[in-house]
Image (tube, coloured by chain):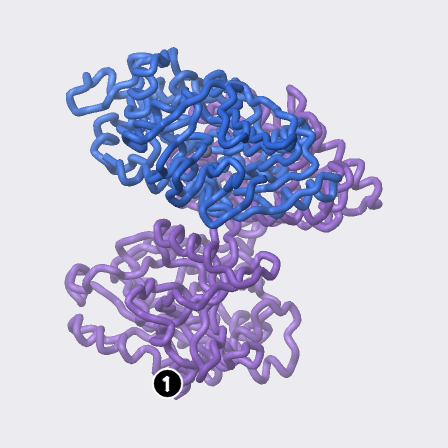
Chain colours: A blue, B purple
């Protein structure tokens, strides 16, 4: 029912693509990250909560939105969107035709982060899953524990008169961190890319703590010991000088591995991800009851081999999501360009 | 790493509970880049740790190696069994993480208790030292029992201990500063008392650090003073008359000690290597009691240095055969004098130390115990000419030492500089890539390069340093998109990217396909302006080889 083509995942009966990487007439887009939502398509179908950020990133396009579980017909093919728990408005795409059901996960996480909607397992015949963290060394602790540590860290930095810099994606983790740091409202500042997302979401009615632009005119007593959220390292930039002495922390699932924490420019790493961990991936696959699983971007070969050895027919699919094994390169590149 | 207890990295620890605090200390130190914070935390820890834990901490922080007590294959098999995990999946994980101890710690799911591992670090070490003598089943039971009592981070440290791979990423300088801070002693005093041959299991560190105890260990060396590479212009050093120049020889940096009628030879890695150089015995016995020399151990015949490749045949051998003594005789080229008549001379000016050293070497009148010759420097330009001829002399460049300088501790700028000849270099193409370990475990950072030989490509060097982070990530993306084949962790890539590869030496080698072995290869720069057709050939390597053999 769905074929893997050079343009991306294609449903012939319904004549639409899902998260295509080349311009096509009709696209169903799981979420607004740049490797899944690319410019140039004739028509976009996405979840209604995805629209504000989609617009902010892609500009005016032919958008059509749907609510959770709402059926959209395409030439007799039933298409519906279901929460993927990855970022705000991120969806899994359910496609049904002549009694067969496929689900394309896009990116997802199984922990409910309180913003993105709880991941909904959907019964299907074929499941197309991501595998960004598809190795058992990637197991996350509950986000509340991480958020506690983040607040403790900010507190300790403030006691030393230092600002705290969080490096996190502008769309997804930035919102979770801003929400977790609500007690610091008034001290929260962010990079332009984060502010753009914040503005798009606030205009759409989301209620986040206030986050501002840091400038040389910001009052000195607020600047020093503030919290700054940015997708790119700001070491050596003007904005870093304005906030005075500081410590920085990278926030990503990759921080699980010591080598990754030590590499890069941050002082510290917080293990916080918008992707499912190993246990989450396995649980999600099992819950679908799918007879066949296609594994896309991430540790495709390891994850599909493990599934095959455990009684689930699984195959690898090469897509152009993520970099190759890391689902981070495109976002990183995009956000570098916005560097202040 | 998942860590059960919330940690506050900015505040020194208060409550001390042995092994657990040690693990926490390592975690904190590993998560900061600020040297001052490292010193702070380590000093706070040392101030409060019980003496036996302090001994172990200092021992481990200054590079004492632990024996491997459990085989890695065994551990891997146990974990695969406990976690019901196929071994191939473990391998995938290991390859991703790049560190065995960490992989095990991340994969084990024994619940972490609230209180963590109790008991002193010293207790833990005693328990571990008995581990290797146990039966396999006993070992297995004990490892599981230990893991079940630990947080992920403690598990990581524990695994490092039992696999014999424990290393701390902290410079000796930091440890010394921290200990000086904790004890109120001078850093140079601490450095000296801490060096040498003491066993953390039996040593009373407080006594070790006390005044006058230096005499208790006759073998104790001084911390080496290391030079920085000269990057600025010579003229910036001031007047040539204030400087002393000598050849920089390529051997093993060593300290020779004669005290209490005994002789000791130390390598820079603080390894006692006396027995490996039996040819030193006679002249060392002739040294006055209470003498410490600094110099270079070289392959040497009749006082003339031989190439480093000759010395290489002696490195790593505990037992030296008669044949080796004949074919690769070793000598000592002295360049400094640190102790005279049992007196520490490090604070005296270099020229004074050198005058006494010269007299000492002359008095010894031994063939392969020589003085590193001083070079005439009336002006800076003649020095540049000398440096250009270094390779023909068999040396790797020049050393510059300020005439009135003291003998300092560790790597310091200002008074000692090494000015090496520019490395030899060729343009080569990237053919294999492998993921880095540790710090770069997600990226392809280890590269293998080839030069051309007619139509073929011949692999000649592996290098993994010299690129910026941005370049590394570009190469990484290239590797992922242009893989031809995968052999385990190694990917073959389309030969497209050209790099200039520098190296310090080149010698003939039967073990390498190319017929040559290069020393210290590294990437000088990425030649984006060059195509694979422009790279150097095997002939150019052989020409370099001939040039060094004259
Ligand atoms: Zn995404
Ligand atoms: Zn993705």
**Helix, strand or loop for disc 1:** helix
Query: Picture coordinates of residue B167 (x, y %)?
Result: 55, 46
Residue at image coords 80%, 47%:
B133
Q: Is residue B437 left or right of residue B469?
A: right
Q: Which residue is mark 1?
A: B547
Going by the picture, which residue comes out furthest to the bottom?
Answer: B550
Task: From the viewer's side, name the closer residue of A26 and B6.
Answer: A26
Establish if A241 lies above or below B250: above
Query: Picture coordinates of residue B478 (x, y %)?
Result: 42, 56
Task: From the viewer's side, name the closer residue of B116 and B408.
Answer: B116
The answer to whether residue B212 of the structure is visible from this angle is: no
Q: How many marks?
A: 1
Query: Picture coordinates of residue A269 (x, y %)?
Result: 45, 32
Query: In the picture, residue B540 is in which quadrant?
Result: bottom left
Query: In the picture, residue A279 is in which quadrant?
Result: top right
Residue at image coords 29%, 35%:
A234
Residue at image coords 82%, 44%:
B134
The answer to whether residue B495 of the structure is visible from this angle is: yes
Residue at image coords 57%, 28%:
A140
The chain letter for the residue carrying disc 1 is B
Q: Residues within 10 Å of mark 1 (few under 14, many from 20)?
A: few
Query: Picture coordinates of residue B400 (x, y %)?
Result: 28, 65
> Mark 1 CB in 8 Å range of ligand 2?
no
Query: In the picture, residue A129 is in which quadrant?
Result: top right
Q: Is residue A296 left or right of residue A282?
A: left
Establish if B142 lies above or below B261: above
Q: Quarter of the image containing the N terminus of chain B?
A: top right
Q: Quarter of the image containing the C terminus of chain B?
A: bottom left
Going by the picture, which residue comes out furthest to the front?
Answer: A75
Q: Is residue B183 left or right of residue B3?
A: left
Task: From the viewer's side, name the closer residue of B327 and A298.
Answer: A298
């Amino acid at each position: 029912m769905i074929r893997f083509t050079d343009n991306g995942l294609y449903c012939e009966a319904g004549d639409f693509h899902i998260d295509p990487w080349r311009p096509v007439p009709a696209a169903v887009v799981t979420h607004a990250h740049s490797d899944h939502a690319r410019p140039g398509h004739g028509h976009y179908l996405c979840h209604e909560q995805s629209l504000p950020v989609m617009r902010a990133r892609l500009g005016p396009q032919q958008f059509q939105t749907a609510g959770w579980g709402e059926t959209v017909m395409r030439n007799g093919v039933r298409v519906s969107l279901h929460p993927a728990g990855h970022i705000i408005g991120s969806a899994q795409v359910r496609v049904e035709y002549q009694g067969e059901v496929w689900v394309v996960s896009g990116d997802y996480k199984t922990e409910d982060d309180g913003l993105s909607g709880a991941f909904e397992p959907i019964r299907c015949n074929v499941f197309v899953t991501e595998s960004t963290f598809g190795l058992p060394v990637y197991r996350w602790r509950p986000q509340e524990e991480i958020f506690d540590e983040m607040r403790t860290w900010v507190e300790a930095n403030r006691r030393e008169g230092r600002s705290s810099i969080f490096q996190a994606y502008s769309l997804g983790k930035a919102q979770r961190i801003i929400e977790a740091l609500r007690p610091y409202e008034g001290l929260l500042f962010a990079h332009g890319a984060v502010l753009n997302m914040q503005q798009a979401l606030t205009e759409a009615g989301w209620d986040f703590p206030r986050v501002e632009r840091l400038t040389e005119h910001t009052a000195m007593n607020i600047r020093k010991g503030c919290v700054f959220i940015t997708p790119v390292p700001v070491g050596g930039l003007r904005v870093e000088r304005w906030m005075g002495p500081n410590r920085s922390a990278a926030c990503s699932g990759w921080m699980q591995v010591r080598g990754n924490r030590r590499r890069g420019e941050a002082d510290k790493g917080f293990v916080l991800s918008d992707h499912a961990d190993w246990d989450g991936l396995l649980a999600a696959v099992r819950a679908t009851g799918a007879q066949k699983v296609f594994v896309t971007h991430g540790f495709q070969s390891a994850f599909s081999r493990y599934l095959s050895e455990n009684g689930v027919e699984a195959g690898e699919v090469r897509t152009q999501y993520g970099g190759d094994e890391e689902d981070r390169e495109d976002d990183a590149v995009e956000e570098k360009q916005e560097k202040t | 790493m998942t860590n059960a207890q919330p940690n506050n990295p900015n505040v020194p620890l208060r409550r001390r509970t042995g092994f657990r605090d040690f693990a926490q200390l390592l975690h904190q130190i590993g998560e900061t880049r600020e040297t001052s914070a490292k010193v702070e935390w380590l000093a706070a820890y040392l101030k409060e740790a019980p003496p036996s834990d302090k001994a172990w901490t200092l021992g481990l922080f200054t590079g004492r190696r632990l024996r491997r007590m459990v085989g890695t294959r065994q551990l891997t098999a146990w974990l695969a069994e406990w976690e019901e995990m196929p071994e191939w999946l473990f391998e995938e994980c290991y390859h991703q993480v790049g560190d065995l101890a960490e992989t095990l710690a991340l994969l084990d799911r024994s619940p972490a208790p609230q209180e963590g591992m109790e008991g002193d670090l010293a207790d833990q070490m005693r328990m571990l030292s008995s581990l290797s003598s146990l039966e396999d089943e006993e070992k297995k039971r004990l490892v599981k029992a230990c893991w079940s009592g630990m947080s992920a981070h403690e598990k990581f440290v524990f695994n490092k201990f039992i696999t014999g791979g424990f290393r701390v990423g902290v410079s000796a300088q930091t440890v010394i500063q921290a200990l000086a801070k904790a004890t109120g002693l001078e850093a140079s005093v601490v450095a000296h008392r801490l060096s040498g041959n003491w066993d953390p299991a039996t040593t009373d560190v407080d006594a070790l650090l006390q005044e006058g105890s230096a005499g208790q260990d006759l073998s104790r060396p001084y911390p080496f003073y290391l030079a920085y590479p000269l990057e600025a212009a010579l003229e910036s050093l001031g007047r040539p008359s204030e400087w002393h120049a000598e050849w920089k020889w390529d051997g093993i940096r060593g300290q020779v000690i004669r005290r209490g009628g005994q002789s000791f030879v130390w390598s820079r890695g603080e390894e006692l290597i006396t027995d490996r150089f039996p040819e030193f015995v006679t002249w060392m016995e002739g040294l006055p009691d209470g003498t410490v020399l600094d110099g270079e151990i070289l392959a040497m015949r009749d006082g003339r240095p031989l190439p480093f490749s000759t010395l290489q045949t002696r490195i790593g051998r505990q037992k030296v055969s008669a044949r080796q003594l004949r074919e690769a005789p070793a000598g000592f080229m002295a360049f400094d004098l640190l102790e005279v008549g049992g007196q520490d001379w490090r604070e005296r000016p270099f020229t004074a130390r050198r005058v006494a050293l010269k007299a000492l070497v002359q008095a010894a009148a031994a063939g392969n115990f020589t003085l590193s010759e001083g070079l005439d420097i009336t002006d800076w330009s003649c020095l540049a000419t000398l440096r250009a001829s270094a390779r023909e002399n068999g040396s790797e460049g020049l050393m510059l030492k300020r005439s009135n300088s003291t003998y300092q501790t560790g790597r310091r700028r200002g008074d000692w500089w090494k000015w090496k000849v520019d490395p030899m270099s060729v343009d080569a193409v990237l053919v294999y890539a492998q993921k880095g370990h540790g710090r770069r475990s997600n990226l392809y950072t280890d590269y293998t390069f080839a030069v051309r030989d007619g139509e073929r490509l011949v692999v000649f060097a592996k290098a993994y340093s010299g690129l910026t982070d941005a370049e590394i990530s570009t190469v990484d993306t290239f590797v992922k998109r242009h893989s031809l084949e995968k052999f385990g962790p190694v990917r073959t890539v389309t030969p497209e990217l050209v790099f200039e590869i520098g190296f310090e030496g080149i010698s003939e080698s039967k073990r390498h396909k190319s017929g040559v072995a290069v020393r210290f290869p590294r990437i000088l720069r990425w030649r984006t302006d060059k195509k694979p057709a422009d790279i150097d050939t095997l002939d150019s390597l052989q020409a370099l080889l001939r040039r060094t053999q004259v």
